[in-house]
Amino acid sequence: MSDQASSQAPEAPAAEQRFQTLRAVLANRLAVVGLLVLAALVVAALFGPQLAPYGINAIEVEDRFQSPSLDHLFGTDELGRDVFSRVLVAARVSLQVGAIAVGISLVAGVTLGLVAGFYGGRIDDVVMRVMDMLFAFPAILLAIAILAVLGPGLTNAMIAIGIVYTPIFARICRASVLSVREEVFVRAARSIGASDFRLLRLHILPNVLAPIIVQTSLSLAFAILSEAALSFLGLGVQPPQPSWGRMLFDGRGFIEQAWWMGVFPGLAIFVTVLAFNIVGDAMRDALDPKQRSVIESRGQS
Amino acid sequence: MSAEVSSPAESVLSVRDLTVRFATRRGVATVVDDVSWEVAAGETLAIVGESGSGKSVSALAVMGLLPTPPARVQGQVWLEGSDLLQASPQERRRTRGRRLGMVFQDPMTSLNPFLTIGKQVSEGVEHHLGLHGSELRDRAVELLGLVGIPAPADRLDEHPHQFSGGMRQRVMIAIALACEPQVLIADEATTALDVTTQAQIIELLGRLQEDMGMAVVWITHDLGVVAGIADRVSVMYAGQVVEEAPVDALYADPRHPYTQGLLGALPVIGGHGRELATISGLPPDPLQMPPGCRFWPRCTRRLDARCEHEPPTMWEVGPGHRVRTFYDTAREGSR
Ligand SMILES: Nc1ncnc2c1ncn2[C@@H]1O[C@H](COP(=O)(O)OP(=O)(O)O)[C@@H](O)[C@H]1O
Ligand SMILES: [Mg+2]
């Protein structure tokens, strides 16, 4: 009886639990590398323009198509611009698009998941059917369809990616809410007159956050990849602003003359996505097993 | 059913003809059927019965905590002259925690693991009485002290996992009593605790009841703890009240074969002298209630075909002592 009781409620409080999670993540070497990469990315995003050895649109036609060297670490492009500087500066837009798009998915998905799971019934049916429909489309096709309606551009790309990744948050959140709302402490909070809003904010939301945090990291990877894909297709970041996807697109035409034009932006995308995935997986593994089993059983319900 | 419009004068909470049905996949289950009871200020009513007899569901219906659907609640729940079942959801919410308090069975799961004890103890006071800041904190300390938690001020910022089961149940009591409700419903409040802790909690509640003058509805499947605390007892079987009596009368002179079985004092008819019987068999499926007396399939005193086919009604066998039988089974043999 008491076994069952303790497996239903996470025992450690939020702060302590997060600390334990952090410690377990740090015990995983690969995850530490992932975290370092993410830290470097954040530095690049914040200080890219200051750190860049050349201006991103400094055109030096004499220096075009230079292969990687100490002067130009990643070489130069067809206009003689320094590829390293452009990759560095583009980190900001990638992280920004990723963060804002995932922020949109997070807020929308968690809100919908909370409401659907908590109230159930018809609201739940309608919300989750819409989420299922969105989920059924391949992500990038859906984003393209949304951009076809909204028109291309950075802001619209963020909105489109945000919509595309909303259903996953809604699903994860709803599944957790379904089991948390049956907990005795929710009923106990109701028994002292807590309003629905209070129940959701104070008693349910904190208890469903763990799987959502893990999903946030994984979704950041997908969102950055989506932004690159959209920019590659000319639907996202518009030139002359550098973005990894756009540089990949531009480098495509010169793959034989100047492989570095496409390879380095591509690598930047690859490394970033990998780092977010590694950190997300490590967080999932690090959630203490008891809680993980709760999350997994919640996921199934 | 009842045509009266006012509640009995001295009772603070009066439940009449309470019926709760659940829509289930297999059909509609009536799990609480025409249950009536009342409790006065300062008084303790015990509701006893085996697990599954509808005690918790009836308590939750009184509190307004059953999800509807799948539950459907009928009857009347009078709290000082107003019928809660007719009140708006907002009015009901304002009575919860303010005028009606409830303590649940499992102290290990009834606290939110992510919130501090102080936050949880002050939650009701905050939204019902509008206290905040240091006033709120002082009240939380006072409440924890009231329920016997040592050094309460130091423990406000701790989380539930730092408290033992007994201490958590004290916290739950502090939460339920924070706004000094008129009625406290304790549903198996000591069942999960060891005997010593159980005795301490019972003693604590008795003392608080005396100080605050509240009515207590003590729900349990354990008749053993009832003798010491209750003024009156209501025995439930398969969703119905089958016997109600002042506590002394019930122990001295149980009239329903089920109550007798619960008390473990039923001499087996045709058995060997002093042999004691426990009740064999299981309670009926709420979807397939026996047409007659619901206890009939397990009863050792089926005296008449009526028992099988006709539902018995409650009748008075003594002062305040009512029983749902066709026969007075105090004495052996038929009547
Ligand atoms: N949500 C529900 N749906 C259907 N049946 C329920 C539900 N909740 C409780 N019941 C049924 O109601 C009956 C009474 O349950 P309960 O009041 O918890 O019993 P007790 O508290 O006396 O042990 C049981 O048969 C139980 O299966
Ligand atoms: Mg119960």
Image: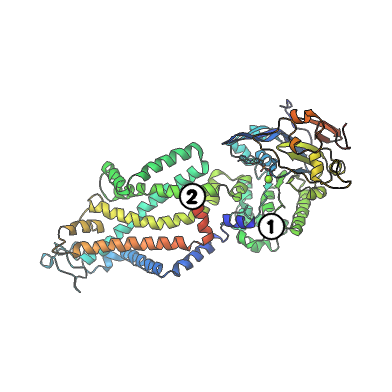
> Whole-Å distance between the Cαs marked 1 and 2?
39 Å
> Could you tell me the amino acid type at mark 2?
Gln
Count of numbered marks = 2
Mark 1, residue position: B144
- Identify which residue, A218 or A45, lies in the foreground: A218
Name the quadrant containing residue B164: bottom right
Q: Position of residue B280 (x, y in %)?
A: 75, 44
Mark 2, residue position: A300
In the rendered image, is residue B99 in sight? no
User: Is A17 left or right of B61, judged from the image as shown?
Assistant: left
Q: Position of residue B101 (x, y in %)?
A: 68, 45
> Could you tell me the amino acid type at mark 1?
Leu
- Identify which residue, B92 or B167, lies in the foreground: B167
- Chain letter of the residue carrying label 2: A
Q: Nearer the viewer, mark 1 or mark 2?
A: 2
In the rendered image, is residue A140 in sight? yes
> Dot 2: within a 10 Å radius of its alpha carbon, few (fewer than 14), some, or many (20 or more) residues?
few
User: Is B283 left or right of A180, judged from the image as shown?
Assistant: right
- Chain letter of the residue carrying label 1: B
| A179 vs A89: above or below | above
- Tell me the element at label 2: helix
- Tell me the element at label 1: helix
User: Is B21 left or right of A94, judged from the image as shown?
Assistant: right
Q: Position of residue A156 (x, y in %)?
A: 30, 47
Name the quadrant containing residue B291: top right
Which residue reaches farthest left?
A: A62
Instruction: State if disc 2 and disc 1 touch (CB < 8 Å).
Output: no
Q: Position of residue B322 (x, y in %)?
A: 82, 34
